[in-house]
Amino acid sequence: MLFNYQEFLDGIDREAYHAGEWQWEEDGYTVTRTYTYSAPGCHTSCGVLMYTKNGKLEKIEGDPLDPCANGRLCMRCLNLEEGVNYADRPKWPLKRVGARGENKWERISWEEALDTIAEWIRVNIDEAGFGRESIFVNHGTGRNISSWVPFLGGACLGTPNIGAIGSSGYSCYLPRTCGTAASIGDFPIVDASEGHADRYANPEWVRPDVVVIWGCEPLKSNADGYLGHWLVACMQQGTQFISIDPQLTWWGAHAAYWLPLRPATDMAIALAWLHVIMYEELEDREFVDLWCAYYDELKAYVEPFTPEWAGKICELDPELIRESARFYATAERAAIQWGLAFDTQNDSIQLCQTVSNLMSITGNIDKPGTNLLVRNGFEINPGYATAQLYCPPETFAKKLTVDVTHPGYVHFIGMADCDAVNHAFETGEPYPMKMFWSQGANAITCTGNAAPRIYQMLENVEFCVVADPYLTPTAVAFADIFLPLKTTAERDSMRVWWTPLRAMKSVSEWYEAKSDEELIVALGNKMNPELFQKRWPTLDALLQDYLDTGFNIVDPRRASPTSRPAAPRPAWWRCLTPTPTSGRSTTTTARAASSRSSRTSAATSTTTSARPIASTRRACCARTARPASPRRRAASSWCPSPPSAPGASTRGPSTTSPSTP
């Protein structure tokens, strides 16, 4: 073994790094131990040491005591000081004074900016007879705002229409999350000990024997919140690799098998692997019998998809396909790490479900050293659907859904449908889009393939607000009001996406900029005072409620009043054990399935194709916050229902209450 994590930990000078302290003075600097959520589009949150002098960020270093990244940083963090202190960064709210695109502005106060927005909505939408659904809120990939901006749209502006503009579907991450929610109940990631505070030194953790790197390059991109270095540590401890990629990446050069497939033929390999595993009886029979539905139907379906069939499509040697399938299936512990290439194919959701079938029939789900069904810290699960909770029901019913342009299809995602949004902007049907709010997005640049189309859409929008740390091309071209936002160095917030819960502490200020959370409080108290003054009058109240409920439920334990009746306790409530910690409530179990049960149930509509799905059964509250040691779980409270199409899985939660742990 080339890597000894305990030796690494023992070699850290804990006194020099002030173990147990979050802030200290050093050589004229104030050093703050915190976490970042850096633009652009960072999916993870790495532990850092921020060095400030006189309230200005001077430099940033990785924190070796952080178990997530162990001091490693990418250029987003290493170059953060330059982005934070950029001289031309807007310092205060701006109002356009010239024609759109002339880049002429005047400084205004936050009070004037918010009053202007509120008055425009009152006069041009409310009193003009339009509904708040005529407001569209555009946000980008940044996971640091993926719940805050939808929440702003629903709770502050009262619109259900939040999401992307110019695209045709959400071909980034969503096919994998929805595809796996439908078939295995949650999102799988490779177990590289990230579920343990002491990581690789934890005696309960077992490294994977085989990891498949499929359609991604974890070392370069660290995509989806997953650090490539975690897999390097596995390699150094003996894990072997399969690379499925048209390009010879670092992983392919170090892999036992490299499959240089023809681009966009991944489905053929997945089906051929299923054929080899099933017809050579390499499946985990115990796991299949206990946890999988429709196995026989799936086996019959993949019979014609031999390695010879796939080899012609993928331009690969059939024996390479056959041998690599055996290598994956016969490993005691194997896992698949996938990437964006899965999301951008025409058959993206079907591909994701087919590969999740590979995990299922080989029993490589939710046991140490395989694919873990990952959860958020303390079950704080806000997401893209937070707009639904606080948007008025009569307005939410008018959300731009997939059936606007594709009749008969079922909408099952939190965001508005891209095609329906484009249709409304371009035709005014089913209603005109009067106002455009952009936050954490840059539509005419980042959605590059559709930039001319988006430009034409936004030219006809009557009122545009852009909130961003920087004056983007979209802001220059269209904004009537610009609101300056804080960067991660100036923001008090948290990162709940996957365990552990991580706090972000502000270390500097940038003139009059506000954080996304501060903007929500200010705008909410202006636009929706009845709700905000009772529940979120201050930033502290907002952040505390985020910790307590994740905005996904109204916590009936709260003593403070809300503007709506407390939600009745769902059946799974007894699975949660309140544990007050520093004045806030948390939960000791990470297996409460309720937060995604509605998404899982709805997402099954994606499986109504001719391709059968081997769905993995899952028991509510069967897994603790750490990867469980037992190889198998208890019997599931979920059971199959008759398929809605030949061979299709329509699994969803049963009507009976899950048993308590």
Image: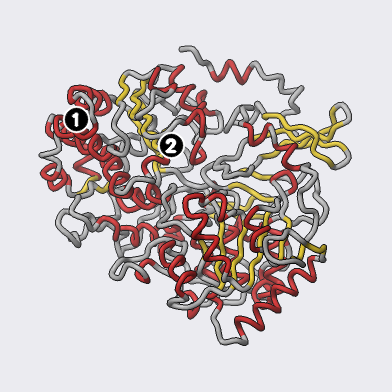
Task: Look at the image and tell me whether residue 622 can be seen.
Answer: no
Q: Which residue is mark 2?
A: 627
Total tally of numbered discs in the picture: 2
Q: Secondary structure at mark 2?
A: loop
The quadrant holding residue 404 is: bottom left
Q: Residues within 10 Å of mark 2 (few under 14, many from 20)?
A: many
Q: Which residue is mark 1?
A: 311
Q: In the shown orientation, is residue 463 left or right of residue 654?
A: right
Q: Position of residue 348 (x, y in %)?
A: 33, 47
Circle on res. 329: none
Q: Position of residue 146 (x, y in %)?
A: 55, 54
Residue 270 drawn above or below residue 231: below
Q: Position of residue 561 (x, y in %)?
A: 64, 74
Q: In the shown orientation, is residue 421 left or right of residue 522?
A: left
The figure's colour scheme reads: secondary structure
Looking at the picture, tell me which residue is in the foreground, 4 or 174: 174
> Which residue is painted at 67% across and 71% down in the image?
532
